[in-house]
Image (tube, grey):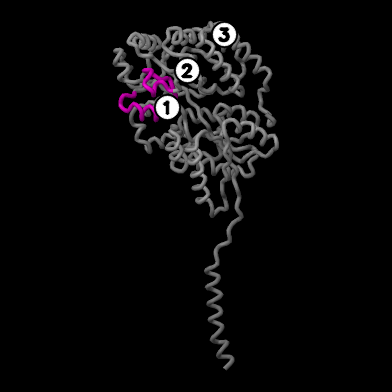
């Protein structure tokens, strides 16, 4: 009787044990956190990046990986990042303005990204994006978005003054631009807005092409020398031509309205790509856009944006690279960021996701970045150069003589660069 009972019970117990084994969940791997810092300029951008981080965490949960993003304003980001490096506790990955890539790379604070991007992947990024992030032949930063600029115009306001814009994808020569401004002025239409009240970086990006298209430079190829370059004869000539816009009352050095073009006050707007959404919403089919006016044989398009870098002190560079690849991925990173911010996709394959890039003004942005884009100069002293150039432009717009002001700006800039180390130290 006993034997029979245990003979019956044994298979039952075995079945229960086997069933419980089958139903036990797999052990959860220990969670590793990738620390990411990001400077954000808008709530829409922050929401988009948080959604990108959330999708990363869902996709990598089975590997025990998650990303934790910390947000910083433009005022606090740089000092917080410098302090983190000084404590030897920087984030694993972080956003970095393209103008700072050289400075951080030369200081040994960021690690090359080449091991994690193959040649085919990199070829999909716009050439300006690759150039911005490359220092001494190594890729140190890669962007999700790119930037561009244009001379927007109101078709109806130009027609009122019998001004004919150039064919699509072309630029006016400087003399044609000045002639158009004069015709508009004579017709009682204020010609153009220039936005000199923007940040130093934005002013540099808008008007460095005036120097470049006139055959000049603002800093030597070594990234330090400005003597004989910043105030070179060709730069004096270019900015003398630019000053005509203010001498002849074609533009105001300090307009009272922050967006006179969108308000229908002026006929043209020298501005960046982010203005396109507002202008299209306000003007619709009356909006046109052309390449920036040129002083030389070709128009040059300014570009450059925030990019992603990995700290040299990242706890696990391999996992940090997973985040960088995710946030620069076509679907996971670039698409939501473009939709949220109006930024230009950094990858060629992404343009197909946005029908607006098949027509103006967005088509102009894509074409110029492929053919005429020029990133900001590779120099560890870009912040000084941008500040010095913007100060010179604002003074020239207010009527100061061009040559003396450029020369004093060159002297001041050379002294500032001499006082600043060529290589960033973590304490900075």
Indicate which label's residue lies in the foreground, 2 or 1. 1
Image point (62%, 34%), residue name: 110
Q: Is residue 297 above or below residue 101?
A: above
286 part of magenta stretch: yes
Q: Which residue is mark 3?
A: 405
The image shows residue 29, relative to residue 86, as above or below, that is below
Residue corresponding to mark 2: 209
Q: Left of 335 or right of it: where is 8? A: right
Q: In front: 346, or 401?
A: 401
Residue 256 position in % (x across, y down) = 46, 18
Q: Which residue is mark 1?
A: 275
Q: Which portion, as a residue range, is magenta?
A: 259-287
List x then y, in percent, for residue 145. 47, 33
Of circles 2 and 3, which is in front?
Answer: 3
Residue in the picture at 43% in, 18% down: 193
| Residue at the (39%, 35%) spot, across then down | 351
Q: Real-space Cα distance between discs 2 and 3?
A: 19 Å
Q: Secondary structure at mark 1?
A: helix
Counting the numbered discs, the total is 3
In the image as oriented, which residue stretches furthest toward the bottom? 1
| Quarter placement of the C terminus | top right
């Amino acid at each position: 009787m006993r034997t029979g009972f245990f003979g019956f019970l044994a298979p039952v117990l075995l079945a229960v044990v086997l069933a419980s084994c089958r139903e036990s969940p797999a052990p959860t791997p220990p969670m590793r956190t990738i620390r990411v810092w990001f400077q954000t300029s808008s709530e829409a951008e922050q929401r988009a990046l948080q959604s990108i981080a959330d999708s990363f965490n869902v996709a990598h949960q089975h590997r025990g990986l998650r990303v934790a993003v910390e947000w910083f304003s433009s005022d606090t980001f740089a000092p917080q990042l410098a302090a983190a490096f000084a404590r030897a506790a920087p984030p694993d990955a972080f956003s970095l303005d393209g103008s700072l890539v050289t400075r951080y790379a030369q200081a040994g604070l960021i690690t090359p990204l080449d091991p994690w991007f193959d040649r085919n992947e990199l070829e999909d990024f716009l050439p300006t994006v690759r150039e911005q992030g490359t220092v001494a032949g190594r890729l140190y930063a890669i962007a999700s978005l790119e930037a561009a600029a244009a001379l927007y115009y109101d078709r109806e306001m130009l027609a009122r003054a019998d001004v004919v814009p150039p064919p699509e994808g072309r630029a006016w020569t400087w003399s044609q631009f000045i002639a158009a401004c004069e015709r508009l002025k004579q017709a009682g239409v204020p010609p153009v807005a220039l936005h000199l009240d923007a940040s130093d970086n934005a002013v540099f990006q808008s008007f460095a092409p005036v120097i470049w298209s006139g055959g000049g430079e603002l800093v030597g190829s070594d990234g330090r020398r400005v003597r004989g370059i910043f105030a070179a004869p060709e730069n004096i000539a270019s900015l003398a031509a630019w000053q005509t816009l203010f001498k002849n009352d074609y533009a105001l050095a300090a307009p009272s309205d922050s967006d006179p073009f969108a308000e229908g006050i002026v006929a043209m707007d020298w501005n960046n790509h982010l203005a396109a959404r507002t202008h299209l919403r306000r003007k619709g089919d009356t909006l046109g856009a052309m390449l920036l006016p040129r002083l030389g044989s070709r128009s040059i398009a300014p570009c450059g944006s925030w990019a992603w870098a990995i700290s040299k002190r990242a706890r696990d560079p391999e996992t940090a690279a997973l985040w960088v690849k995710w946030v620069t991925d076509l679907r996971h990173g670039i698409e939501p960021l473009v939709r949220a911010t109006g930024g230009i996709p950094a990858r060629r394959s992404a343009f197909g996701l946005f029908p607006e890039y098949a027509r103006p003004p967005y088509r102009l942005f894509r074409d110029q970045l492929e053919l005429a884009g020029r990133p900001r100069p590779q120099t560890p002293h870009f912040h000084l150069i941008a500040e010095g150039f913007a100060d010179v432009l604002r003074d020239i717009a207010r009527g100061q003589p061009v040559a003396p002001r450029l020369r004093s700006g060159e002297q001041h800039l050379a002294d500032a660069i001499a006082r600043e180390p060529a290589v960033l130290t973590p304490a900075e």
